[in-house]
Amino acid sequence: MRLVFMGTPDFSVPVLEALVEAGHEIAAVYCQPPRPAGRGKKDRPSPVQARAEALGLTVRHPVSLKGEAEQAAFAALDADAAVVVAYGLILPQAILDAPKRSCLNIHASLLPRWRGAAPIHRAIMAGDDKTGVCIMQMEAGLDTGPVLLRQETLIGAEETTGALHDRLSRMGAEAITTALGRLEDLTPEPQPEIGVTYADKIDKAEARIDWTRPAEEVDRQIRGLSPFPGAWTDHDGTRIKFLASRIGAGSGAPGEVLDDALTIACGSGAVQVLRLQKAGRGPQGTAEFLRGMALPEGTRL
């Protein structure tokens, strides 16, 4: 098929690669414009732009798709379909109507649960035991379109958003190639009215750990916010990000270090921290971290 691909971050890259490998013609790749990044704050292309250019594909990164000129340029591509995954711009109706068949979105949740911006984070933070990807026909509403194909997966007991992100990206790549190959045979299923939830964008204010909360909630916060923005606490004025954890054994005062394996007491129960990061340093396993910053038994965070 002749496709337009629309995506921006790392999550979208395996999908683009899968479409190319499957032999589809990519008429153009749309992504967000380069943004200032790094110490020099120089404009850096998005992961999708970098990969698309390496593949020799035409790249466009308009600031908006609301103008008539941009909409005409999109329509002139004469695409059979558009594949959209984590693009970052709202698609006006003129864009949705332009492809011959439809605009298909890859969404990283089991719709209608977790419509919106941060479905992977929210699924882990809410304690969901499963998630997945949906191939959805796009319409004007926020992730409200009918679903063509869905694939489920269990969420691991120690899985972080980063790890689940990578798994769902690969699942999305497989699902969209399957859906495009079976497009004539798939029946769009309207999303049910019951079970709708919204995955609000992650606010950095959510990242500070409240040790008075139950261990299950603290563990889900740590895993759900890893690697970004990273759940954090402080000790003697030093901010420490916690990037991986599991439910631990023991109890004590909230925030109290219980042993030399960095098990930390919560309002009820405890969590064992597996990976963490001090400001200005890279992520480290617990044993390595503790060799550089002592947090002995009895320390209060």
Image (spheres, rainbow, N blue to C red):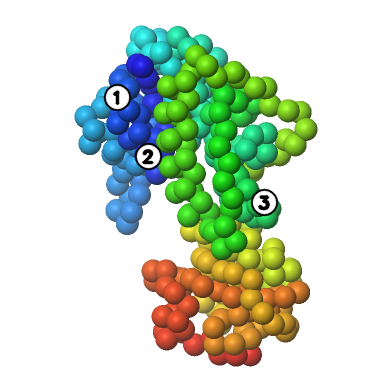
Question: Element under label 3?
Answer: loop
Residue named by callout 2: 14
Image coordinates for residue 117, horizontal then vertical, percent: 58, 40
Tell me which numbered mark, 1 or 3, is placed earlier along the sequence: 1
Q: Quadrant of the image for the C terminus? A: bottom right
Viewer-closest of 63 and 168: 168
- The residue under the point 44% across, 74% down is 285
User: Is 269 located above or below residue 64 in the figure?
Assistant: below
- The residue under the point 55% across, 74% down is 273
* Residue 118 appears in the rendering: no
- The residue under the point 32% across, 57% down is 39
Residue named by callout 1: 23
Q: Amino acid at mark 3?
A: Asp
Q: Amino acid at mark 2?
A: Pro
Residue farthest to the bottom, as pictured: 297
Q: CA distance from mark 1 to mark 3?
A: 36 Å
245 lies left or right of 59: right
Image coordinates for residue 70, horizontal then vertical, percent: 40, 16
Q: Amino acid at mark 1?
A: Gly
- The answer to which quarter of the image holds residue 197 is top right
Residue named by callout 3: 128
